[in-house]
Amino acid sequence: YYPRLRKYARYFIRNAEEADDVVQEVFLQLWKDQKRLDPQQNIPSYTFTLLKNKCLDLLRRRVVEEKYLVQKAKKESEELYHISFTDG
């Protein structure tokens, strides 16, 4: 399943390294859940759902980080603007 999961994650996330990390997290989660999973269930479906949710989590985290960075940059530029015109 690895090639299909990787392709799906790369399409979803649009960043190869982050996508590979997410796929690795999925396999780690499957390993942790192996005793809880029923072999009669649709494991591929569960795996792709897990991948989709982890991709969405990453994308949400990106949005929060970008908002933080924009706010931080705005604050720093305002401080620099204030310093340059009040110290001169």
Image (spheres, rainbow, N blue to C red):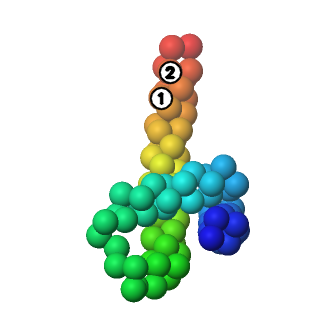
Residue at image coords 64%, 65%? 2
Specify the label residue 79 is tagged with. 1
Is 6 situated above or below 84? below
Specify the label residue 6 is tagged with. none
Question: Residue 75: x percent and y percent?
Answer: 46, 37
Residue at image coords 51%, 43%? 69
Q: Secondary structure at mark 2?
A: helix
Residue at image coords 70%, 66%? 3
Residue at image coords 40%, 85%? 41
Type of the residue with mark 2: Ile
Q: Residues within 10 Å of mark 2 (few under 14, many from 20)?
A: few
Question: Residue 81: x percent and y percent?
Answer: 55, 29
Type of the residue with mark 1: Glu
Asked if the residue at tag 1 contacts the one at tag 2, i.e. Cβ–Cβ closer than 8 Å, the answer is yes
In this view, the residue in front, 34 or 23, is 34
Is 24 situated above or below 52? above
Identify residue for label 2: 83
Q: Residues within 10 Å of mark 1 (few under 14, many from 20)?
A: few
Q: Quadrant of the N terminus?
A: bottom right
Per the model, the C-alpha gap separating discs 2 and 1 is 6 Å
Visible in this render: residue 35? Answer: yes
